[in-house]
């Protein structure tokens, strides 16, 4: 039986440089850390995100994505100021709980066969205005680094 997404994501995110790679993709490329981890988790079973299913899910759960973005933004802002740093630290558990909820919801989405495609390129194609447009070289490098740090071989 396959390990659940939440426990897998928590363990993998703690590996050296995985968090940094995820956050770089988030901050530089607008990626969702939860979706990146979900995509890599799916890839272990030779699965990729289903474009239509993920698009519908995003519309249905937009408030959840927005809550994560706002909590993260508030936490980062509060942590910048020594006077409010403790408030930022206390915000982190709520941000993590919200991400756990999103990961639980993503885990329930069906995947589709990977068919030799690179997992994170599949996720990128769903986000691209032109799905056949390849990610930039910098984004591809960040994708490769993340998969390497997760110990996953890219096709």
Image (cartoon, rainbow, N blue to C red):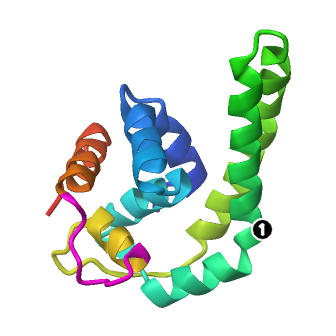
Residues shaded magenta: 127-136
Between 3 and 140, the one nearer to me in the picture: 140
In-image side of 91 versus 145 (left or right): right
Q: Going 81% across and 40% down the picture, which residue do you hit?
A: 94
Quadrant of the rendered image containing residue 84? top right
User: Residue 69 location in percent, x, y?
Assistant: 68, 51
User: Residue 55 location in percent, x, y?
Assistant: 55, 83
User: Residue 120 location in percent, x, y?
Assistant: 31, 63
Q: Is residue 68 above or below residue 50?
A: above
Q: Going 51% across and 51% down the picture, which residue do you hit?
A: 33
Q: Going 32% across and 84% down the picture, which residue do you hit?
A: 130
Pick the quarter of the image with the C terminus: bottom left
Q: Main structural element of the magenta stretch: helix, strand or loop? A: loop
Q: Is residue 44 above or below residue 116?
A: above
Q: Going 21% across and 71% down the picture, which residue do you hit?
A: 134
Q: Is residue 41 above or below residue 53?
A: above
User: Residue 93 location in percent, x, y?
Assistant: 78, 34
Quadrant of the rendered image containing residue 36? bottom left
Q: Is residue 39 above or below residue 11?
A: below
Residue 4 appears in the figure: no
Q: Mark 1 points at which residue?
A: 63
Label 1 secondary element: helix
Total number of numbered labels?
Answer: 1
Crowdedness of circle 1 by 10 Å Cα count: few (<14), some, many (20+)? Answer: few
Asked if residue 132 is among those painted magenta in the image, a careful observer would answer yes
In-image side of 32 versus 117 (left or right): right
Between 123 and 2, the one nearer to me in the picture: 123
Asked if residue 34 is among those painted magenta in the image, a careful observer would answer no
In-image side of 117 versus 92 (left or right): left
Residue 65 appears in the figure: yes
Specify the farthest residue to the top.
Answer: 82
């Amino acid at each position: 039986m396959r390990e659940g997404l939440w426990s897998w994501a928590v363990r993998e995110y703690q590996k050296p440089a995985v968090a940094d790679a995820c956050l770089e993709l988030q901050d530089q490329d607008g990626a969702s850390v939860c979706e990146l981890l979900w995509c890599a988790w799916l890839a272990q079973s030779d699965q990729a995100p289903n474009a239509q299913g993920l698009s519908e899910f995003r519309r249905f759960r937009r408030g959840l994505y927005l809550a994560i973005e706002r909590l993260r933004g508030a936490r980062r802002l509060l942590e910048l100021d020594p006077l409010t740093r403790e408030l930022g630290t206390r915000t982190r558990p709520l941000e993590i709980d919200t991400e756990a909820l999103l990961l639980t919801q993503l885990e329930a989405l069906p995947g589709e066969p990977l068919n030799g495609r690179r997992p994170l390129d599949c996720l990128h194609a769903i986000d691209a205005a032109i799905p056949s447009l390849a990610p930039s070289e910098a984004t591809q490098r960040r994708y490769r680094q993340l998969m390497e740090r997760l110990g996953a071989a890219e096709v």
